[in-house]
Image (cartoon, rainbow, N blue to C red):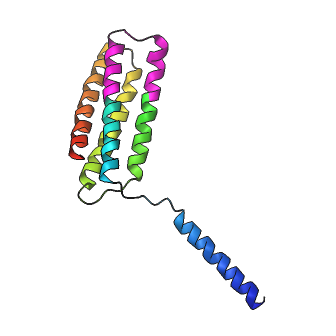
């Protein structure tokens, strides 16, 4: 192999390494503003879930809505949790991020209870969802 071919091969290999390094999916540090926005979205989702539980328990939802809306809520919670699990926070925000992740995990579990039609299970879901709402609102306030 000629010197020119080796040089070209080496340059190509270096470009590949640089591209691979730039495309890595390493977590980025979340800004305080982005964290606050995410906490707002999570609190809003918890609030919507409480409202839905109240409507369903009162018999004010159609069968189709009662069956499909929990799936939507679950998807939203899963997306927020996925994003939170890929985020890193600065040292001063790290404890809040861990509580946020935990709160989202609990919210996701509680949303699954919204598939129930039993009033006792719905009451349990409402109680749990209200607790998660309070937790997420506190994190929202903390991240201002």
Q: Is residue 107 magenta?
A: no
User: Where is residue 90 shown, x and y percent of the image?
Assistant: 29, 59
Could you say which quadrant of the image residue 41 lies in?
top left
On screen, residue 6 versus residue 29, left or right, reads right
For residue 106, say whether it is visible.
Answer: no
Q: Does residue 86 sit above or below 52 in this rendering?
A: below
**Residue at the (43%, 25%) spot, across then down:** 70
On screen, residue 99 versus residue 28, left or right, reads left
**Residue at the (49%, 14%) spot, across then down:** 64
Could you say which quadrant of the image residue 40 lies in?
top left
User: Where is residue 17 shown, x and y percent of the image?
Assistant: 58, 72
How many labels, in total? 0
Q: Is residue 66 magenta?
A: yes
User: In the rendered view of the protein, which quadrant contains the N terminus?
Assistant: bottom right
User: Where is residue 3 shown, x and y percent of the image?
Assistant: 74, 91
Q: Nearer the viewer, residue 28 or 33?
A: 33
**Residue at the (21%, 39%) spot, across then down:** 138
Q: Main secondary structure of the magenta part?
A: helix
Residue reaching furthest to the bottom? 3
Q: Does residue 76 sit above or below 113 in this rendering?
A: below
Residue reaching furthest to the right? 1
On screen, residue 108 versus residue 68, left or right, reads left
User: Where is residue 49 shown, x and y percent of the image?
Assistant: 35, 25
Region rendered in magenta: 47-72
């Amino acid at each position: 192999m000629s010197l020119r071919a080796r040089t070209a091969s080496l340059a190509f290999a270096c470009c590949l390494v640089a591209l691979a390094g730039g495309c890595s999916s390493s977590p980025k540090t979340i800004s305080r503003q982005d964290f606050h926005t995410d906490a707002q979205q999570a609190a809003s989702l918890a609030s919507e879930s409480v409202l839905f539980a109240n409507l369903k328990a009162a018999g004010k939802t159609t069968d189709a809505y009662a069956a499909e809306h929990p799936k939507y809520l679950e998807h939203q919670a899963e997306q927020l949790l996925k994003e939170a699990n890929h985020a890193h926070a600065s040292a001063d925000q790290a404890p809040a991020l861990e509580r946020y992740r935990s709160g989202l995990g609990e919210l996701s579990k509680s949303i699954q209870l919204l598939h129930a039609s039993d009033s006792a299970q719905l009451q349990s879901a409402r109680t749990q969802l209200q607790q998660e709402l309070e937790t997420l609102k506190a994190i929202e306030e903390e991240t201002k």
